[in-house]
């Protein structure tokens, strides 16, 4: 498979993201929840997860009460232990929901990458193209819809004060992302994927991606826009890929 085809195949996942996001419930609907609508078609469980996404991100696990969750979702307080066992169970379900949404966007990317690695060892050019596609796909998720703002609040809280839910996040997403990134960066730099330098370089590159999530509001205000458009995303991808070249193609002194 040619380098151009690899890059085209993987990078296609970036632009597919916005199509899948249309199907997701907007957090705006929770500002004026409709209990009758939420009660139809077995939506109470989903409504509670959406309420948890909003409230756990804003207030944290401990400060969010079951009454707050019930009022925001339009569900009865008893629905929380019925569907999730406890408030903590709902919190874990919210984390699983976040990971499901991430998988919607990057699952195909990881599958294609794994297939390519099984077929033959990647060349440096192939690894570089694949890594750029992975990083721009992840960055695209962070800025192409409003929902990741709620993800960011929860993820930042978990980074600062990990709970049992962080184990879910690490096992299902971060471990896979880091392993793939270490392998690709190892090929690009010619270094051992398990080496300290590769892990530090990978973490530095990941920090650039997370910056678009945790500092999203700062970016929007600096651009004087409420939402990034296609031109913004194209420039963002160019900046990220240029940064990858600058950081990984030059040896550390």
Image: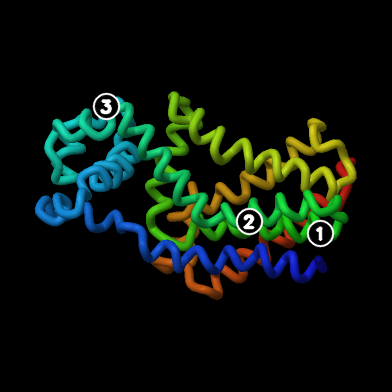
Q: Nearer the viewer, residue 249 or 35?
A: 35
Q: Could you tell me residue 135's position as x and y percent?
A: 65, 54
Q: Are marks 1 and 2 in contact (CB under 8 Å)?
A: no
> Is residue 111 depicted above or below 75 in this figure?
below
Residue 190 at x, y percent in the picture: 89, 45
Q: Residue furthest left?
A: 36
- Crowd around label 1: few <14 · some 14–19 · many ≥20 (10 Å): many
Give the percent coordinates (x, y) of residue 220. 45, 62
**Which residue is label 2 attached to?**
109
The image quadrant where one finds the C terminus is: top right
Q: CA distance from mark 1 to mark 2?
A: 14 Å
In this rendering, the answer to whether 199 lies above or below 220 is: above
Check the image and report above or below for 88 versus 146.
above
Q: Earlier in the sequence, mark 1 or mark 2?
A: 2
Tag nearer the camera, 3 or 1: 3
The residue at which mark 3 appears reads as 85
Q: Which mark sits nearer the N-terminus, 3 or 1?
A: 3
Residue at 62%, 44% in the rendered image: 207
Residue occupied by mark 1: 126
* 46 lies above or below 132: above
Q: Quadrant of the N terminus?
A: bottom right
107 vs 245, left or right, is left
| Residue 247 visible (yes or no) | no
Q: How much space separates mark 3 and mark 2, taking CA atoms?
A: 34 Å
Q: Nearer the viewer, residue 206 or 177?
A: 177
Secondary element at tag 1? helix
Determine crowd level at label 3: few under 14, some 14-19, many 20+ residues with C-alpha closer than 10 A: few
Q: Which image quadrant is residue 29 in?
A: bottom left
The answer to the question of whether label 3 and label 1 lie on touching residues, with beta carbons closer than 8 A, is: no
Q: Could you tell whether 232 is left or right of 58 in the image?
A: right
């Amino acid at each position: 498979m040619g380098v151009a085809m690899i890059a085209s195949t993987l990078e296609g996942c970036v632009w597919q993201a916005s199509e899948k996001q249309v199907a997701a419930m907007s957090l705006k609907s929770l500002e004026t929840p409709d209990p009758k609508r939420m009660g139809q078609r077995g939506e109470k469980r989903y409504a509670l997860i959406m309420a948890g996404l909003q409230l756990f991100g804003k207030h944290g696990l401990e400060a969010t009460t079951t009454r707050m969750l019930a009022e925001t979702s339009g569900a009865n307080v008893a629905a929380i232990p019925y569907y999730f066992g406890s408030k903590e169970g709902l919190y874990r379900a919210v984390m699983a929901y976040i990971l499901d949404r991430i998988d919607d966007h990057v699952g195909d990317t990881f599958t294609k990458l794994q297939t390519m690695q099984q077929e033959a060892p990647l060349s440096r050019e192939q690894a570089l193209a694949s890594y750029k596609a992975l990083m721009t796909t992840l960055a695209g998720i962070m800025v192409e819809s409003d929902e990741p703002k709620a993800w960011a609040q929860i993820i930042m809280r978990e980074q600062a004060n990990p709970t049992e839910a962080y184990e879910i996040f690490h096992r299902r997403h971060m471990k896979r992302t880091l392993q793939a990134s270490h392998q690709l960066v190892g090929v690009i730099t010619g270094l051992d994927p398990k080496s300290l330098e590769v892990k530090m370089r990978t973490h530095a590159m990941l920090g650039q991606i997370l910056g678009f999530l945790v500092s999203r509001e700062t970016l929007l205000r600096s651009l004087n826009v409420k939402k990034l458009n296609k031109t913004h995303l194209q420039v963002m991808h160019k900046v990220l890929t240029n940064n990858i070249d600058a950081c990984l193609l030059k040896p550390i002194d």
